[in-house]
Amino acid sequence: MIANNIFRAIADFCTNVLFAPYQAFRFTDGWWSSNMLNVIFISIGMVLFLYWLVQLQKFKKSSTE
């Protein structure tokens, strides 16, 4: 009985709290406005990936690993 209530509480928290920002994006018009959060995350990931590659090149030139 307690385990069932815990899982229901977790499901309720996820659907009502964590996914609440995505409910606003469901009803927007246009592709860009609907996927702006994904574009922001991909942009941040690309910047961090390029920074990582630059750091790898620095370590490779100084021959330290």
Image: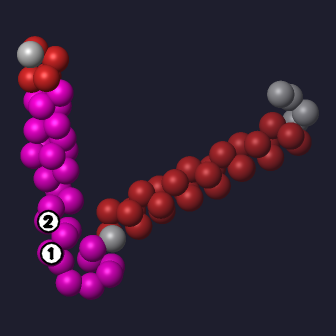
Residue at image location 64% in from the left, 55% down from the top: 50
Residue 11 is a magenta residue: yes
Could you tell me residue 42's position as x and y percent?
Answer: 47, 61
Q: Which residue is mark 2?
A: 24
Left of 32 or right of it: where is 12? left
Could you tell me residue 21's position as x and y percent?
Answer: 17, 56
Identify which residue, 62 or 53, lies in the foreground: 53
Q: Are marks 2 and 1 in contact (CB under 8 Å)?
A: yes
Give the farthest residue toward the front: 1
Quadrant assignment for the N terminus: top left
Left of 13 or right of it: where is 32? right
What's the residue type where badge 2 is placed? Answer: Ala
Residue at image location 76% in from the left, 42% down from the top: 56
Secondary structure, magenta segment, majority class? helix
Looking at the image, residue 18 lies above or below residue 47: above
Tell me if mark 1 has few (under 14), some (14-19) or many (20+) residues whose alpha carbon lies within 10 angstroms of its own. few
Could you tell me residue 45's position as x and y percent?
Answer: 52, 54
Left of 35 or right of it: where is 19? left
Looking at the image, residue 34 lies above or below residue 59: below
